[in-house]
Image (cartoon, coloured by chain):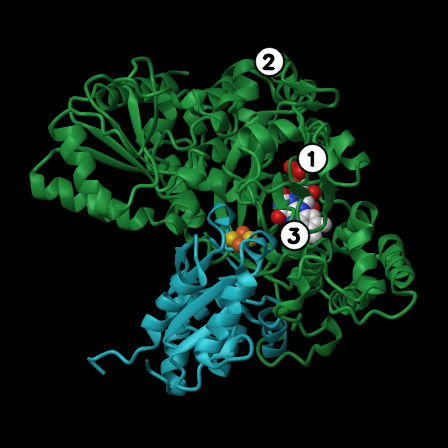
Chain colours: A cyan, B green
């Protein structure tokens, strides 16, 4: 990942100039930039303000509203666990708690080695398979505490190639 | 006229090729529900197995047939022409299924749920006789799980774009509106407003441009039917939008989807591209005078973005905060231009209503609730899934027949309907009919069609706490009754759940809730007390046990209370600074 100021600006510019839909807005630029960079560094916000002809303050205003945007680098792996009512009835609290324990976290956030980002999701849209999680953007349903710990544990184990 | 007939002829020929079974036709349900059950892995195993054996077959990814409990669901059409369905398939099952059914022509004894089609397959029962299928009447879901959403010809072969063709060449725009009005169709996004009447508002507004906005924000936990339609049959929505556009004189359509739901987004975008290729979008559609553009508009995570005026701000790229009304969208909508907003399901009905007539549609259903309801049944239920049933059947039929009842010999405790702003009903609600008015009078709403079933082990306080936590988390922060009220409601409900309540807490809840109801800007705050009110109405005893006896009868409330807190900085934290760049105020730029 190019973490330099210039790298961020260039990649943001490329992402926001190659959007698929004809209508381009501050929000669509933010989504495109985060898809590219994984989060929104200051440089992305500035580049979007310049491109859309508005202020960084306005861009921050939009970015801070939607809960999918983040402003610090994400962990290498993304784990989202649904806490929606269906998943709640199916045992989500127990799964959440055991994953938090496994990762040494007390809520949403990154593990200390920045390997895993944990996020709560209000509904992953597969309620019929509750409880549901999303692991690196792949949905997994019909979870138990054991399968959830197994899946997350696999991400945790340091892989041999590194 | 000719343009459509030509497409139809091509489509029919392709369809005949598929169903002839000369090559086996294998369909795998890979909508989000299928994916969560492991369909992606099953699909990969299937491809590898066919490759290994050198079997030449057509494999299509389809959406959701609705029987999500049976997923991953795979079906195979062979020479006999009927679809044989294999349920709960694992990658390990694949080789056995191929060996047995494709190679040796033997129907396996296990793992087969039924067949669909003219000719029976062995002594397998018809899938239409399965309790989850028997009472369905599929209009919006007519193609779901049946056609490949990626293949526009499959949609056309099933009569797709025939409604649009009829509207364009046999009807005036006013006739189309009359037909929709006569059908009694009402909005399926929550408010149940008559669709024909809504469209007629837009007709009277000046244009171009005029916009048709399709709302697939679908933030309601427990409902995935809008996403399900986009993943299963995106063309039915596009055709519905086109019909609405023709009827109202609109020029552009936006399909509004939450970022991150890749299945619905990709399938809709692909469908749009195909429709442009075949002249079903763009200039002079099907050779008529009518031109129309559609694009997908992505939003970030925000429940309130589904509220119609917040949706317009989100399309413009701003914070999704509701606007004051009036002006109403038909007068000044997105970018200040006349706009019409409908839910996915509402628009998905339009093609069939135009094709088959308003009489046909209004003959289904009861009273002022005509047509069908598309439901997502989940929770403590034997057959969770996405079902389409005629309006007017009872909740008992939905839960006990289609849903197969509560599993494990447990008793039903409650139903949560209409999303987090809806309400709960008790086990005594089984006689209530699916009817907008009857549901509302019972203190719940049909809303977007989510029905969450909870068994006797459920604590009403615990479930209410989760719903209120959701509403607090999702408050957009624009108006203070909702922003502060939700915080208060959550604090009090959490206190009750922890058995730490203070005297007068129930009165305090009611007083805060009623203030929010009367003074909030949008439905989020106005309806946000609904879950608590209905829970108190039906399950006051649960609350009293926590408050007076200081105990949770089910023990559910002793567990961890994990939910994220609302972190949206309030609007007033952002003092607009002096422009740093060109000095132009923000305005979405429309390219091309
Ligand atoms: C907080 C809030 C969230 C809403 N979310 C949705 C939604 O996700 N999808 C939807 O179709 N309607 C939603 N609505 C209702 C819309 O405001 C609007 O009534 C609806 O999209 C109109 O379409 P219809 O006439 O086809 O029902 C929401 C309303 C409120 C107050
Ligand atoms: S409630 Fe968990 S996926 Fe919908």
Residue sitting at x 43%, y 32% = B144
Task: Determine whether the residue tagged by mark 3 lies in a helix, strand or loop.
Answer: loop
Side (left or right) of A64 relative to A118: right
Write down the residue under mark 2.
B360
Residue B399 vs residue B413, the one in the foreground: B413
Q: Say whether disc 1 or disc 2 marks the residue closer to the N-terminus.
A: 1
Between marks 1 and 3, how big is the CA–CA gap?
Answer: 46 Å
Residue sitting at x 42%, y 73% = A38
- The chain that hosts pointer 2 is B
Counting from the top left corner in percent of width and height, residue A126 is at 48, 49
Between marks 3 and 2, how big is the CA–CA gap?
Answer: 42 Å
Q: Quadrant of residue A146?
A: bottom left
Q: Return the mark for residue B568.
A: none
Q: Same chain for the residues at labels 1 and 2, yes or no?
A: yes
Q: Same chain for the residues at labels 3 and 2, yes or no?
A: yes
- The chain that hosts pointer 3 is B
Q: Return the mark for residue B458.
A: 3
Counting from the top left corner in percent of width and height, residue B397 is at 62, 27
Above-or-below relation of A127 to B520: above
Residue B288 vs residue B56, the one in the foreground: B56
Mark 1 in CB contact with mark 3 (< 8 angstroms)? no
Residue B208 visible, this angle = no
Write down the residue under mark 1.
B202
Q: Quadrant of residue A37?
A: bottom left
Of badges 1 and 3, nearer the viewer stands 3
Of badges 3 and 2, nearer the viewer stands 3
Side (left or right) of B199 relative to A88: right
Task: Determine whether the residue tagged by mark 2 lies in a helix, strand or loop.
Answer: helix
């Amino acid at each position: 990942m190019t973490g330099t100021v210039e790298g961020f600006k260039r990649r943001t510019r490329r992402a926001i100039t190659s959007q698929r839909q004809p209508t381009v807005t501050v929000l669509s630029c933010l989504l495109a930039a985060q898809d590219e960079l994984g989060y929104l560094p200051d440089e992305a916000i500035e580049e979007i303000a310049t491109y859309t002809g508005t202020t960084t303050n306005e861009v921050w205003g939009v970015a801070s509203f939607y809960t999918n945007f983040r402003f610090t680098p994400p962990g290498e792996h993304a784990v989202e666990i649904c806490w929606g009512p269906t998943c709640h009835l199916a045992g989500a609290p127990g799964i959440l708690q055991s994953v938090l324990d496994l990762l040494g976290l007390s809520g949403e956030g990154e593990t200390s080695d920045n390997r895993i980002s944990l996020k709560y999701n209000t509904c992953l849209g597969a309620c019929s398979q509750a409880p549901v999680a999303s692991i690196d953007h792949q949905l997994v349903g019909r979870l138990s505490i054991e399968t959830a710990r197994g899946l997350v544990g696999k991400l945790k184990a340091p892989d041999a190639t590194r | 006229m000719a343009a459509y007939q030509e497409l139809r002829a091509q489509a029919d020929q392709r369809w005949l090729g598929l169903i002839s079974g000369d090559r086996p036709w294998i369909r795998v349900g890979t909508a989000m529900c299928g994916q969560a059950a492991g369909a992606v892995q099953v699909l990969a195993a299937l491809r590898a197995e066919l490759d290994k054996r050198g079997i030449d077959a057509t494999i299509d990814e389809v959406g959701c047939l609705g029987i999500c409990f049976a997923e991953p669901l795979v079906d195979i059409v062979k020479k006999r022409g009927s679809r044989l369905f294999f349920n709960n398939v694992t990658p390990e099952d694949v080789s056995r299924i191929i060996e047995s059914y494709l190679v040796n022509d033997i129907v396996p004894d296990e793992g087969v749920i039924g067949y669909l089609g003219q000719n029976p397959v062995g002594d397998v029962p018809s899938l239409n006789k399965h309790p989850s299928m028997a009472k369905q009447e599929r209009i919006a879901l007519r193609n779901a799980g049946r056609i490949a959403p990626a293949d526009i010809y499959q949609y056309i072969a099933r009569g797709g774009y025939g409604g649009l063709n009829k509207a364009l060449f046999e009807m005036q725009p006013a006739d189309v509106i009359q037909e929709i009005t006569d059908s009694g169709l009402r909005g399926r996004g929550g408010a149940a407003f008559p669709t024909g009447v809504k469209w007629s508002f837009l007709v009277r507004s000046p244009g171009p441009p005029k916009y048709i906005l399709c709302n697939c924000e679908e933030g309601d936990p427990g409902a995935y039917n809008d996403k399900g339609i986009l993943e299963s049959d995106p063309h039915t929505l596009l055709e519905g939008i086109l019909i609405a556009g023709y009827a109202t004189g609109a020029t552009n359509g936006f399909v509004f989807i939450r970022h991150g739901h890749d299945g619905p987004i990709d399938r809709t975008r692909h469908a749009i591209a195909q429709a442009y290729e075949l002249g079903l979008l763009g200039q002079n559609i099907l050779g008529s005078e009518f031109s129309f553009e559609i694009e997908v508009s992505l939003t970030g995570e925000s429940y309130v973005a589904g509220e119609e005026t917040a949706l317009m701000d989100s399309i413009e790229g701003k914070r999704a905060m509701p606007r004051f009304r009036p002006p109403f969208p038909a007068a000044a909508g997105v970018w200040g231009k006349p706009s019409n907003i409908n839910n996915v399901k509402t628009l998905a009905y339009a093609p069939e209503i135009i094709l088959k007539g308003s009489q046909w549609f209004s003959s289904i259903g009861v009273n002022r609730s005509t047509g069908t309801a598309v439901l997502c049944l989940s929770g403590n239920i034997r057959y969770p899934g996405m079902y389409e049933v005629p309006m007017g059947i009872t909740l008992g039929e939905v839960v006990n027949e289609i849903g197969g009842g509560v599993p494990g010999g447990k008793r039903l405790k409650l139903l949560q309907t209409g999303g987090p702003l809806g309400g709960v009903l008790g086990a005594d609600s089984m006689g209530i009919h699916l009817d907008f008015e009857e549901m509302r009078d019972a203190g719940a709403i049909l809303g977007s069609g989510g029905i969450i079933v909870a068994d006797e082990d459920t604590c009403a306080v615990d479930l209410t706490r989760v719903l209120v936590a959701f509403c607090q988390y999702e408050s957009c922060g624009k108006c203070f009754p909702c922003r502060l009220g939700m915080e208060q409601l959550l604090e009090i409900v959490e206190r009750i759940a922890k058995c730490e309540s203070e005297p007068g807490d129930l009165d305090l809840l009611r007083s805060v809730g009623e203030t929010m109801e009367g003074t909030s800007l949008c439905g989020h705050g106005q309806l946000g007390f609904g879950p608590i009110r209905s829970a108190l109405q039906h399950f006051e005893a649960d609350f009293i046990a926590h408050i007076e006896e200081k105990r949770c009868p089910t023990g559910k409330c002793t567990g961890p209370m994990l939910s994220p807190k609302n972190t949206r900085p309030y609007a007033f934290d952002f003092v607009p600074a002096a422009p740093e760049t060109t000095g132009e105020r923000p305005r979405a730029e429309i390219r091309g």
